[in-house]
Image: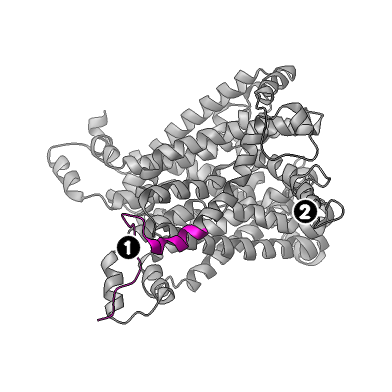
Amino acid sequence: MAKFSGMKINPKHFHRSQIKFFAVLIPMAFFVSLPMLFIISHAFKPMNELFAFPPRFLVRRPTFDNFRNLVSVASNSGIPFSRYVFNSLLVTSIGVFLSILVTTMAAYALSKLKFKGKKLLFEINTLALMFVPIAVTIPRYLTIARLGLIDRYLVLILPLIAMPVGLFLVKQFIDQTPNEVIESAKIDGASEMQIYLRIILPIIAPAVATVGILSFQLIWNDVVGSTLYVDDESMKTLSFYFSTLASLVGNPVAGQGMMAAASLIMFVPNIVIFIFLQNKVMNTMAHSGLK
Amino acid sequence: MIRKMNGPWWFLTPYIILFATFIVIPVLLAVGLSFTYFNTIETPEFIGLRNYIELLTRDEVFMQHVLPNTIRFAFIVGPIGYIMSFLLAWMLSQIPHRPRTLLAIVLYSPSMTAGVAMAVVWTVLFSGNATGYLNAWLLNVGLVQEPIQFLTSPQYLMNIMIVVSLWGSMGVGFLAMLAGIMNIDQTLYEAAYMDGLKNRWQEIFYITIPSMKPQMLFGAVMAVVGTFQVGAIGVQLSGANPTPQYAGQLMVNHIEDFGFIRFLMGYASAISVVLLIMIYSISKVTFSLLGERD
């Protein structure tokens, strides 16, 4: 009998045979994280270090100047920084909530309910996984304008709620849940909505977390909405304000520090949320297959 | 009221309305407008296939720069990003839980950065004078005599776009493949070695990939879509649309150029339709390469 020497998935302990993987993964992770380290370091550089020649990668005497400048440049241009923060938080929190609700409800129906056209709907959604929003920016704009949504908070939220990837992942996840629980609840006289709220939602918590993360990333980072669909400056979001920094700040060197600070502000919520929920995301992804 | 909510439409209606309004209608509208002349002021005028004919026969920029650029970009970033995601996931699955989680978060993190917000990092790193970090380093080490115009010279722009895109290519597909590998039944490997499997490569091709084919397919779609989604990066890096000598011009930028700069919406829509068809066909080809029917 040949000695088993194959792949060990999810080993419990470190073993010499893993060194080769670490030898690739660690340098790779280091290389990948360099731009991140750069943003962090750059964001805290005082003016004289931003101007320094030759440039130094790491900050020596960290300050919050760049962050303070972000706030003051915003108020100089007429809109207080806090307004952008408020808009972003408002739009993102409502958007994520609605996205989770709308997506999980649809996924429940596509997974567990019986009706005509179910297969077709799921296939259309699977096809839409290939949808690239940026390709139809113009007709999307025309649709939104025709609906009279321009210059409303809703326009920063609604276009981003229906996420084909989200629906796909949740539906695959619900497929794995047992039918018996649902059947017995039905016998007890529960309506389908009650089953969804009391039984399905709690079981699919990992998938909910995953849709939440994906939708958070989409809405929090979105610039298109504020750029194209909203003219009222006071309704625009943080990501939009940051995207205009280059033109707001005349001095490109001072601008760099502020932009790094801005990138950091955009990035931190994303990574923090992901770190907290990564277990749940991995759990959902296990059922992510396209069949 | 909740007690009486039965039937699928309670659940499906909100999604279907939003899906139809912001995905289906824009796509259909793009198809419709692609057969018209539309300058946003006058009503669209039907002109048949003229936009497509123009695009394929008269638009020199499209044929000489945009299309080759897009194909080159997609055929490098897509497959390399995909294979890299798979191999990294494969290695990650074979190390203990804690380091795996940490390294996976680090590798995934670039895909969470907002493209626009990151533009600053790249412009500073690749800046064309001696204050750019890469230039300063190259000068210091003595590899170059004078700073290279990374972002404005056509020969570098495309390569930098490729590197930057690859940097962010470990996204949702990567996580899916990692989860897929983690869930493969360990006994499959043991059995396969009894049956005479010889080495790691055989193991990958005969056991790992077939056992996680659904995740491989999902990852492939995500790779294709991701590749086309990041297309705008050349404009951000060089700070101009069109990019210098069209070196980094991809279809997405071409659409923007005609739609929002020249206001030729009908023509821009025709490019959109071509782009969507391209994405669809590439996904289909990828599927058949991966053996969808198995």
| Residue B37 image offset from top left, x and y in percent | 76, 51
User: Is B177 or B218 nearer to us in this picture?
Assistant: B177
With respect to residue A69, does A26 lie above or below?
below
Residue B35 visible in the picture:
no
| Residue B148 image offset from top left, x and y in percent | 83, 53
| Distance between the alpha carbons at the discs numbered 2 and 1 | 47 Å
Left or right placement of residue A195 versus residue A166 in this view: left
With respect to residue B285, does B27 lie above or below?
above
| SS state under label 1 | loop
Chain letter of the residue carrying label 1: B
Q: Amino acid at mark 1?
A: Ile
Q: Residues within 10 Å of mark 1 (few under 14, many from 20)?
A: some
Q: Check the picture and name the quadrant holding the C terminus of chain B.
A: bottom left
With respect to residue B281, does A144 lie above or below?
above
Q: Residue at the spot x=56%, y=50% of the render? A: A30
Left or right placement of residue A123 versus residue A264 in this view: left
